[in-house]
Structure formats: structure tokens, C-alpha cells
Image (cartoon, grey):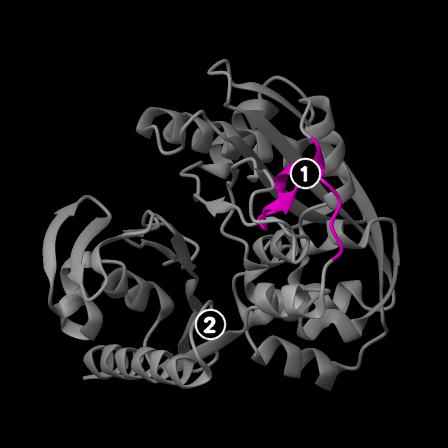
Amino acid sequence: MPDAAAPVRLPVPLVLASASPARLATLRAAGVEPRVVVSDVDEDAVLDAARRSRTVTPADAVLLLARAKAEDVASRVAAARETDGGALVLGCDSMLELDGEVLGKPGTPDVARERWHAMRGRSAVLHTGHWLVDARTGALAASGTTASTTVTFADVADDEIDAYVATGEPLVVAGAFTIDGLGGAFVERVDGDHHNVVGVSLPLVRRLLAGRGVAWPSLWSTPTPTAPATATASDVEERSMTSRHVSTVVGRPAAEVYAFASDLDNLPRWAAGLATGLLRRDGRTLVLDSALGEITVTFADVNEHGVLDHDVTLPSGEVVQNPFRVLAHPDGTELVFTVRQLDLTDDELDRDAAAVAADLATLKGLLEA
């Protein structure tokens, strides 16, 4: 193992101004652990304002929206002083262009089915706008650009389209497909950056960072020694982390489920761990007394994307991020909570997952009563 006295390089703080699970997963897979803050931008208003003065192409539109999201979140983070010394804020937005028409999120099964009948056997262009705001200096310096990737779809059969639409996945993503999910089998070819199709181009973000004088490795979440060191098998084992997804389906509309679950006043009714020990509440942050000492739990702002992620700050100062999503489902709503093992034993992870499952079952019972 590296010398314990060797200096370490802490990651540059990055805020992701997006509720997209795919973007977050892509960054995490690349070693970057961003804080997620969802913007309050009215996308239609942004585009309508731009169209009053000029023609807005799909490539322009995604960049305008990415900029609006990044600037909105950057101003909120700066006002709240949520990071010491400021942070980098990345906003992204994606749209699929087919025959000059923009295909956003379908929203309904009928629209998703219609989109797939139009797309199958053909090629379309996926545009993703990226906007980076550097709030470290207080001047909110920024830069951005759009990446465009050509996607060729398989000539899928009607029953395949019906089955895919029934999963609910294509209803909530730009272009009505995912390349990293169930829709991946229906994509024949990608010409360009694969990551861009997921929703964030890592090479492009790296170039934007370089323009701000930030090296990509400085965002890696695992501190690394400044001097080269050879990793041993035990080092790799120590850095590994298992995640477990706990989910349940609630037979109620997603909007209704999210409204109830995101209301912190309802938490004691279904979250056993938060039913006792509450010391005080400050907006979306709860301060609790636990066996470890005083901890804080900060929930994501209420948003239209079903994000209920929350950060738990332990007495040691370590922050544990807990992804929690409310997703549309053919039978109503799916609740998905990610439990991370961290330093827990397998038995402790099992107990944590069981506790979360019990909480979700209680929430389901309240909503379906």
C-alpha cells in the first residue's frame, strides 16, 4: 500500500445540474462522484424566448437548455454557499433529431409507440448540449458546446415495440430509447461518441475542463497519491464497493407517489430510521441523533423528475450519497432505492437492504390504502 504519509489529491467538487440517472451513472463509472442538484428551469420558456429573435436548431436548443440549467444551479449553489471555495457545475440536455424534427421525451405510451414506428430501420442524430460553469472564482466563468452522434436503429417488429413501450423506459427519455438499458438491443450502430448517446460526452467534458485549467484526473473521487504507486490486490479490494437496488411497485400514479414521498412531514410515517431521533429540521435538511452521534440528512429539492436522492453526513464528516428514484411504471409507480455497502459487512448490508425494503413496503401500504 502507498505510504500513509504521502500527500493526497482531493477531487475538485463537481455539481451535476441534471436528474438523469444515466448521466450520473456514466460519471460515476468514470471515477467522478458529483453532487446532484436539479434545476428549476422552464425549458419551454427558455426556447420560446430564443426563438423570438432567431432560428433555433436542435443543436442550438440543447446548448441553450444546458446553459440555463447550469447557470440556474450555479447561482443557487453559490447563494447557499454549499461548497467551500466554489465548484464546477455541469449542465446537459439531449434531443433526438429525425428528419429535422426534434423528438424529446414521449411522456405517453401512444407517443412512444408512434416514435418507434418512425425511427425503426433508420438513422437519427442525438444532440447533447454541455455547459460548464466555473464557480470557484466567484465570477461564474463558463463555456459549452454541443456533441452530435448518429444512431442507427434496428428494424424492430411491432411486438418488440409494444413490449418495450410496456416497460415504461422509453416514456421518460429523450428520443424514446436508451442505449445503456432495455433499448440497447434495438440500436444497430453508433457513429460518434457512445457516451454522448447516454447523455454526457466524457471526452467533451474533459476538453471543457481543460479550458478552465482543470485536469480530468482531479475530478476522480478516490484520492490518489501524488507520486506513482503500485496497487496491490488488497488495495483494490479495499476500494471496491457493492451496491444493491431495492425496489417496489406502487399501484398509484407517479406524481401522487412523488408528492407524498417528497413531503418531509410524511417521512416519520414510513421511514423507520427517521421516525425517532429527530433533533431539528432546516428546510430540506434533517439533523438526527444516531448511535454514531449527530448526523444530517439533506434531501434533493422537490423536482419534476422523480429524484429523491439524499446525502447523509456522518459525525466524521464523510458524506454518503443515497440515490432514491420515483419512476413511472406500467402498473403505477416504481420506487428504487440504492443501498451501498461501503464499510459494511455482508450481513450488515443485508440488514440495511431489509430495512429499506420494509420502509418501502410501509410507504406502499400508505399510498394504496
- Rendered view: 259 above or below 109: above
- Rendered view: 299 above or below 363: above
Is the residue marked by circle 1 packed among few (<14), some (14-19), or many (20+) residues within 10 Å? few
Is residue 187 found left or right of 259 in the rendered image?
right
- Residue found at x 57% / y 34%: 65
Is residue 328 found left or right of 27 in the rendered image?
left
Quadrant of residue 257 in the image? bottom left
- Rendered view: 51 above or below 322: above
Is residue 134 found left or right of 2 in the rendered image?
left
Tag 1 secondary structure: loop
Residue 283 seen by the camera? yes
- Residue found at x 33% / y 25%: 79
Disc 1 designates what residue?
226
Q: Amino acid at mark 1?
A: Thr
Q: Nearer the viewer, mark 2 or mark 1?
A: 1
Q: How many marks?
A: 2
Q: Which mark is on residue 341?
A: 2
Q: Nearer the viewer, residue 43 or 281?
A: 281
Q: How far is the residue under mark 2 from the one under mark 1?
A: 28 Å
Residue segment shown in magenta: 215-230
Tag 2 secondary structure: loop
- Residue found at x 28% / y 84%: 358
Residue 254 belongs to magenta span: no
Q: Residue furthest top?
A: 139
Q: Nearer the viewer, residue 232 or 196?
A: 232
Question: Where in the figure is residue 39, as x and y percent of width and height?
Answer: 44, 39
Q: Nearer the viewer, residue 104 or 131?
A: 131
